[in-house]
Image (cartoon, helix red, strand yellow):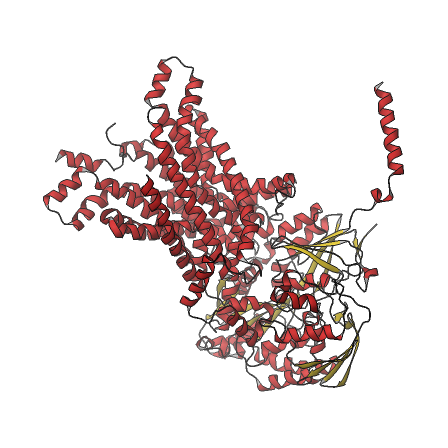
Amino acid sequence: MRLASLTFGLLSGLAASVTAPAAAFADPPKVLHISLIQDPDILDPTLSGSYVGRIVFAGMCDKLFDFDPSLNIVPQLAIGYTYKDPTHLIINLRPGVLFQDGEKLDANAVKYTLERYLTMPGSLRRGEISVVQSVEVIDPLTVELVLKAPDSALLAQLADRAGIIIAPKAAAAEGAKFGLHPVCAGPFSFVERVPEQKIVLKKFPGYWDAKDIHFDEVDYVPFVNSEVGVANLQTGQLDMLTGMLPNDVATIKRDPKLRVESQTSLANVGITFNVANGPASQSPIGQNASLRHAFELALDRTALINVVYNGLYAPIAQANSPSSRFYVPSIVPPAMDLAAAQKLVAQSGVKTPIPVTLLVPNSPDFLQAAQVIQAMEQPAGFDVKIQAMEFASSLATARAGNFQAYLILWSGRADADGNMYSFLHDGYGFNYGHYDNQQVDSLLDQARVAQSVTDRTALYAKVWGIERQDLPILYLWSPTNIVGLKKTLLGFHPVPDGIVRLQGMHFAS
Amino acid sequence: MQSSLGARLLQIIPTMLLVSVIVFALQHLLPGDPAVMLAGDSAGDPHVVAQIRDQLLLNRPIGDQYLHWLVGVLHGNLGYSWELSAPVTTLLLQKLPVTLQLSAMAFVIALATGIPLGVISAVKKGTPLDWLATSVGLFGLSVPSFWLGIVLILLVSVDLGWLPPSGYVPLSQDPLQSLRTTIMPAFVLGNAVAAIIMRHTRSAMLAALHQDYVRTARAKGLSERVVVWRHALRNALIPVVTLAGLQLGTLLSGAVLTEQVFDIPGVGKLVVDAVFNRDYPVIQGVVLVTGLLYVLINLITDILYAVINPKLRGG
Amino acid sequence: MTALVAGAKMARFKWKRLARHGSGLAGAALVAAFVLAAIGAPLIAPYGPDITNWAAIRKAPSIAHWFGTDEIGRDELSRIIWGARASLEAGVISVLIAGAIGVPAGLLAGFARGWTDAILSRIVDAMLAIPFLILAIALAAFLGPNLRDAMIAIGVSTAPMFMRVARAATLDIMTRDYIEAARAVGNPPWRIALRHVAPNIAAPVLVQANLSIATAIIAEASLSFLGLGEQPPTPSWGSMLNAAQQFLTQAPWLAIFPGLAIIAVVLAFNLTGDALHDALDTRRGK
């Protein structure tokens, strides 16, 4: 009796499943879970200042231009550009592009967005495109940017956040609250955000490049604790772990289900010396370039990178990393030479040990690196005191000039101007040491006018010639972007800017 | 009783005002410019920073800024997070339940472990069992919660793989997963409180077991078990539970570290991040609300204790 | 006269009971051991706490390094021994600060009553309403991340507890007969406060102090763990735990040993505190 009813049950179940509509067998939604090293700030391209925000924007908001893996500027929402003359830039837009709310992307939308970047209170894009005087609509698919002066760094900005075009009606309606429900023209639309927990985007069917999108949903999850991120990648809750630390690489490599992709980033870490910012600049190391040279010669960058970063980062002596198109191959870090360092110290006539206070934002790896630097400088005659502070305080301290040396990271830009101008030009916000060299200022300004990468790199090479003599900033290493991902996640091509581009990525079937 | 209740309630107002003044003054003394923090990578442009400062009213005299904030609070507006770009009220509504869930679970764990251990060690006073229970209690008090958390993650998540190492799933979303993500942090959080409750229970039980009514019950011939569980424990529990209520403050404070270690998006993590980011409105709002909660809980516990206490004598 | 003396003895320690308290003695011995380790670190530690060795990064415990080496090759055992200094300093000095602020305040509030008591009590309530760690974090961030300022931050945050204890004890003492007697004889208030009240609140304050040292040590470790306490390269168990977090899977010993050290010291103070508490007899009659 039981057997009969069991068989009957099985048969009817089978019959039901055979006749069930095809939808019952639909694939489960393909969801991509990507980690971020911190929670982004506001998701409005006008107001966003965080590095990780750009990763989310890559999933949600397309830009006029983009970078390919070699950092060449390639079309995205714009299909081409021409300079009518150095101060008139014509941009040709891609036809048939829709925003996620159905609005058309045309020249008016571009004009609206760029003007918002230039005029909205609190806009962090203003400084990036401040050279733009006005935006003119030539026809629905052509925009003309009138510039105050020639600026070859502008295009790179239009391939970054300042090139993101947002939906005008949605932005006008929401105003400053646009960041809570952003609407752009990227592959995925914003669904929801729980602060510090997740950002959920779902596939936008009307995306102009929909054929290259192979996920139904993308979840960005902030993981501040990297060990926890690694654990989540191992258990499969994460598909991709960005911003991995060198110490975690071995763990991921041992896991047969995972793989690691590394690439030198655009970022740089260096020590900024206070050479002219207030009374604290009147230190032996602040006033003597030869002592700064001695400081450099006592350091073994490679050994430091081995100890702190498992040898995975790249030693540098310039602001542009080896991944940058503007990297000058002839500017390389000198090998450690303790004897030469000691000689320079002796020649300076300053009594040893020479005290140097090193201001350090207290992230764990920076603290380690600072201790390594301290140990390396000691035989050269420098008594390095570590002044660790949490990040906000260290910034304030540096800006106020209350430092002698400041170990700081810059997240890096594809265009050299973004890595050099505000840091080395007199009077700008990241030039904490108030370095002031008229030749350098003039060369930096000239490089904004020169058009080709070759010409500009030649000018920057001249800047490095001077900078390497004065040594206001001692560049140490460039971090490596390390990404851990499932072996089943294919189509990922790392770009040195560290942004994860979802076009072409897919799960193995 | 009536007048002192009214007086106590009134006292909350100057207390909370003082709290807000202390915190306001403190965070404005914190070095670091919130405008620079907010500007992030664009802090290189001095115009951008100046504009943000204006927007955030940072150039106004501090008294003005405080009054502006206070007026807002009285209208139910706790301010707007500069860093997270959301109203503080929204953030609190999202994150307070998380911390409360954690604290409630921790409290239950603390009671469920502390009381039985305390009873055992009191009843079996002087025996090895007492020694064991007391030692467990002492360890609970002596272990730093963040270390316990790290070690548990190492053992339970990394080595054994039984529980997820971090993160949080809301109860409403998936109760089972929610429990799995919160059981370790709740245990870590409740650990110290469990030890305190255990000690209180032990001394309350010891005191209760010496009371006249216990002797009377024994003389009446009631079994030891009835004496202990029905009479002594019932009376011992009352001061213990009300004293335990005061530990909720400890829980809120402990949540700060536990949420950091386990990456739980609660109020503790919110306010620590806000201190490091100089997100003044969040710090102000969170401390005000949690302070109010703490003060109210204390008030209720005190009232309960006073009301129930007379009943204790007599038994 | 006898009544006065008898009353004065009420809030003192039963020394005999203390001497026979087994676990209390064990705790005291452990405390002594740590104090010796802290003072004698230069002699006891096998290596200096700052000696780096690029070739021996994160090595597991071995004969050469009983507790292994840390992330830049320093001997972990030596750093733990030297780290005792920061922890004990933090514990003791924070509590001294807390006592110096809280006890006079409590004494004053309990003695003077009225508006003084009301204002002081409101301030204490306000400070207690702010979660302890938040207050300490904010203070430490404001003062700057280093051991000295962390101790001030912890001291200020712990002061309310001392104020409460001192106040409660003062209120209790004030009701005793000998105070009335002293007043009747014509003693001025300050004399009563100093000669009769203060000595008698010493005992409960001492018990609180002992227990607070334990919480202060944990608080210092917590602040260092968050990056706000003792800064590298000076060893502190909390900052060692902070650094150890990144290497949990590769070098778990870096997380285990500093934690055990903290537990041991805190346990020691808790044991002695309990012994003092048990020996403290404030019950009347019986």
**Side of B144 relative to A459 (left or right):** left
Q: Is residue C25 visible?
A: no
- Which residue in the rendered view is the most extreme toward the top? B221
- Residue, x 34% and y 18% (percent of image)? B215
Residue B233 relative to residue A301: left or right: left
Q: Quadrant of the N terminus of chain A?
A: top right
Name the one closer to the observer, B62 or B117. B62
Left or right: C225, with A417 as reference point: left
Question: Which corner quadrant of the image does residue B165 belong to?
Answer: top right
The structure residue drawn at horizontal position 84% and vertical position 24%, both measured from the top left corner, is: A6
In the rendered image, residue C237, in percent from the top left (x then y), is placed at: 48, 50
Whether residue A298 can be seen here: yes
Residue A46 in percent (x, y) is at 64, 69
Taking depth in this image into account, of B92 and A159 the one nearest to the observer is B92
Q: Position of residue C254 (x, y in %)?
A: 55, 48
Counting the numbered discs, the total is: 0
The image quadrant that residue B66 belongs to is bottom left
Q: Is residue A4 above or below residue A41?
A: above
Residue A183 image-quadrant placement: bottom right
Query: Residue A357, percent across and down?
Result: 48, 68
Taking the image as shown, residue C130 lies to the left or right of residue A137, namely left
In this rendering, the answer to whether A360 lies above or below C132 is below
Extreme residue in the left direction:
C185
